[in-house]
Image (cartoon, rainbow, N blue to C red):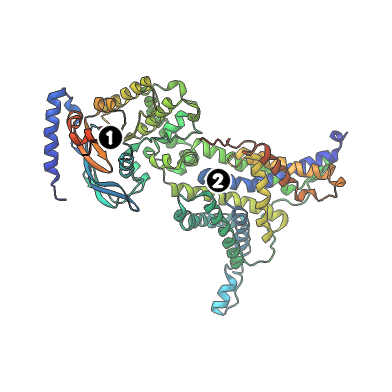
Amino acid sequence: MFLTDPFFWEIVVSGLLAGVMYSLVALGFVLIFKASGIFNFAQGVFALFAALTLVGFQTGQVPFAHVLSWLTGTEIHNWGAGLPTLVAILFSLGVMILLAWVVVRVVLRPLVNQEGIILFMATIGLAFVLEGLGDLMWGANVKTLDVGLPQGPSDTIIDATGMFVEKIEISAAVVAVILVVALMVFSQYTKMGRALRAVADDHQAALSVGISLETIWWIVWSIAGLVALVAGIMWGAKSGVQFSLSLIALKALPVLMLGGFTSIPGAIVGGLIIGVGEKIFELYVGPFIGGATENWFAYMLALMFLLFRPQGLFGEKIIERV
Amino acid sequence: MSLPPTAEAAENDDAYAAAEEEHGLNPRQVGPVIMDIRNITLRFGGVVAIKDISFDVREGEIRAIIGPNGAGKSSMLNVINGFYHPQEGEIWFRGKKRGAMKPHEIAKQGIARTFQNIALFRGMTTLDNIMTGRLTKMRKNMFWQALWSGPAEAEEIEHRERVEKIIDFLEIQHIRKTPVGRLPYGLQKRVELGRALAAEPQLLLLDEPMAGMNVEEKEDMCRFILDVNEEFGTTIALIEHDMGVVMDIADRVVVLDYGRKIGDGTPDEVRKNQDVIDAYLGVAHD
């Protein structure tokens, strides 16, 4: 019986932990979608850009080094000394907040009142611009990110249960839980959170009670930037900071379809289901159909959901009034 | 401005004196002009929604804007609260000319409103909805809010007290914790009024507060509007289709038709105005 098989439980646990990583990315999508009705295609690139910036600050890279060298004829690529990890993280957060401001001013403000699809297209453009900017600022080479998180498998868990679990994935899970709780508290119990929910519900009404949409958007995109930074740190620490990191956004899509685009708990549960689901599917069904099912399982599951429950598990039911 | 505002004001004073004599209107309500709308013209491309309209609102009065469909009533309200920016004309609020402002800045100045098609935060409870109305009154910044301690908490309690008073006033205690999306239409309208009241507005704009209500709900809403005006001394400008209601509760009425002003005065004056009668009943062309 597979329930008594320790290997099965190892798969479940590692699936859950991998799912947390998906959820981290999905969370950024949900936040922006709720507050401004925009599906931010650039969220994955946000995570990449945040991770690149963090590594850059940490290792003392000079931003735009190649451009500067070309302009001035010097060959300075490094300040010689990097920033301590914590300071570098704070600086990166500052950069993400600045980026959020620029996005609101340059992309969102001129497109106020436009169709959702137009804003979506704009975020695709934003993704390309940001990817290019990241390349230009910090270079395209693969970087290692070390923020002092424990690496390797956890010996205590191996000794206790015989399961092989990565320490970094446990950290990711803990951080994700803290982040979600913090976001919930912020959204439910503070004045700003109330304003955020108000904007998510009705733009016009929000304006009429004195809420500035631009300020709220700035805050929301900044929070999404923070979430991207956390996701970037976790993914970067696990598999290195490389440009393929921006593709994790694609994995967040099925998570969102499962959980619902407007639900924070949905993003978490969706991530967990997909994380566990794809591992178990690969283990028990994979061998019969040639393996490598992890590449498509999530998308297939999402398709099933689109057929039978298009609003996802926790999303708002879409009611079209005629 | 060609016409000195004083002359107009004096004229209105006379109108008031007459109205008081006639109806025994309570003189407590009427103060100086709080909002003066001067020669507003609003165009959407080639369509002129409002053409050269001027009128004023006095402190403490109930001012109605009426007119047939498409007359420009809602557009007028949207101009006052900043959703639309007129191409021509001036708006004077509390003795100051208003520059181009955004709706949320105007809300902070003390102008609250409700909408023709209810615009509530449907996912939130009645209590939370009305609390959002207090946002402009909250002083403590995000930092305090984040810490959730001391002054911010004291402030939150103070705001809760005000909100509870409004909830009592509107008799919606039983739905305090209900998400407003689930409430019947009449109650939603009442919650929306509550949210506007929570801002303690200097000027309250109501866009068809009684549209789509049954007789009983209409009577309730009428009573609330009159009570708000009397007890809090709130100045109210409202749009309404129900003539009976308007003539009963409004101190003065301005009548629009095809974006133009065709009448302005006490309900009785307006009722006798030939242009108004023509606009509502149609006129024979020969």
User: In the image, residue B85 lies at what x, y percent?
Assistant: 32, 49
User: In the image, residue B101 lies at what x, y percent?
Assistant: 33, 49
Alpha-carbon distance for marks 2 and 1?
A: 39 Å
Hey, which quadrant is residue B17 in on the image?
Answer: top left
Mark 1 crowd level (few <14, some 14–19, many ≥20, 10 Å Cα): many
Label 2 sits on what residue type? Phe
Q: Is mark 1 on a helix, strand or loop?
A: strand
- Circles 2 and 1, Cβ within 8 Å, touching? The answer is no
User: In the image, residue B35 lies at what x, y percent?
Assistant: 23, 41
Please give left or right for residue A209 compared with residue A156 in the image. Answer: left
Residue A89 to residue A75: above or below: above
Residue B255 to residue B46: above or below: above
According to the image, label 1 marks what residue? B66
Q: Is mark 2 on a helix, strand or loop?
A: helix
Label 1 sits on what residue type? Ile
User: In the image, residue B58 lies at what x, y percent?
Assistant: 21, 36
Q: Residue at x 44, y 27 (%)?
A: B185
Q: Which residue is drawn at 14% across and 36% down?
A: B12
| Residue in front for this viewpoint, B57 or B281 | B281
According to the image, label 2 marks what residue? A33
Quadrant into which the N terminus of chain A falls: top right
Residue A218 to residue B18: above or below: below
Name the chain under label 2. A
Name the chain under label 1. B
| Residue in front for this viewpoint, B26 or A160 | B26
